[in-house]
Image (tube, rainbow, N blue to C red):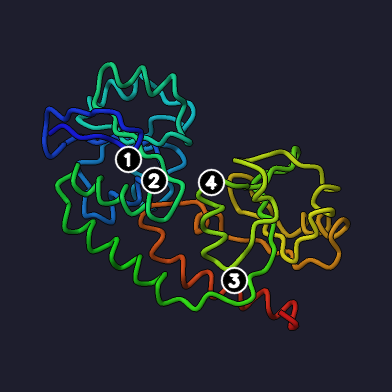
Amino acid sequence: MTVRDQMQRLVELPVYPPRRIVSLVPSQTELLYDLGLDAEVVGITKFCVHPPHWFRQKPRIGGTKQVKQAVIESLQPDLILGNKEENDREQIETLATRYPVWMSDVHTLSDAAHMMEMIGQLTGRTEAAQRLVQQIQQTFVQWPKPQPLRRAAYFIWRKPWMVAAANTFIHEMLQIAGFVNVFEHRTRYPEIALSELAEANPEVVLLSSEPYPFQQKHIAEIKHFCPSAVTQLVDGELFSWYGSRLQYGAAYFIHLQSRIRLQAPNF
């Protein structure tokens, strides 16, 4: 099989369906599990925490940014799954000289659906992938997005403080969840000073559980600059994972909006 990935690279699979798959992306690892694969997945990263028993049992090839080439070589994969944003370009290019490497590039919910369908096709799980995509799309169609939309800032890192801005999947999910990103005039993941946050004057500040593990103690730092904003710890996986975890997104956003309204009844 020869296909184009989401970076428009031609990828040739000499073995179809692949019998030995290495996943370099946590959300795509979970997708493989939800498509009914198991023995075919022979390597994952140290950040691939779902499903838990794979995290405990599957061979680990390092991190998303620092893969161990020697470990991958020992696994002799028929297919490697990566992502433009999450993986290191130079490492991917090196791997691609020896193995079929299919790359995703996801910025929108539509991109995520296409990625899931393509991985379903690549792995011989076309029908399972189509059912999953339809289920996810239906949950988002049915969810009652709140009105009016609340102005929000979404933090991914501390020291330096970094937010999710435009041209990111998190930005797309903020919009779907019922927020207007106060940093939508910026791009990617800019560093900001908390004085800039105060100037942006968000109604809601969201502190993600990943990649930086924000905790309750960090809320006070935000409150010092934005005392009137509702500040919430949020599950970063449900804002940034673009695989099968999306099936839980709509329910989580309903719960999150309810928590926010409890803190600010005027919402």
Mark 2 is surrounded, within 10 Å at the Cα level, by few (under 14), some (14 to 19) or many (20 or more) other residues, namely: some
Q: Residue at x 76, y 39 (%)?
A: 159
Q: Which residue is mark 4?
A: 168
Q: Which residue is mark 3?
A: 256
Q: In which image quadrant can residue 12 be found?
A: top left
Q: Earlier in the sequence, mark 4 or mark 1?
A: 1
**What is the spatial separation of the Cα atoms under label 2 and label 1, in whole angstroms?**
6 Å
Amino acid type indicated by mark 4: Thr
Q: Is residue 134 left or right of residue 139?
A: left
- Image quadrant containing the N terminus: top left
Which dot, 2 or 4, sits closer to the camera?
A: 4
Q: Which residue is mark 2?
A: 55
Task: Relative to 255, say whether 14 is above or below.
Answer: above
Mark 4 is surrounded, within 10 Å at the Cα level, by few (under 14), some (14 to 19) or many (20 or more) other residues, namely: some
Q: Which residue is mark 1?
A: 58
Q: Earlier in the sequence, mark 1 or mark 3?
A: 1
Numbered disc 4: secondary structure: loop
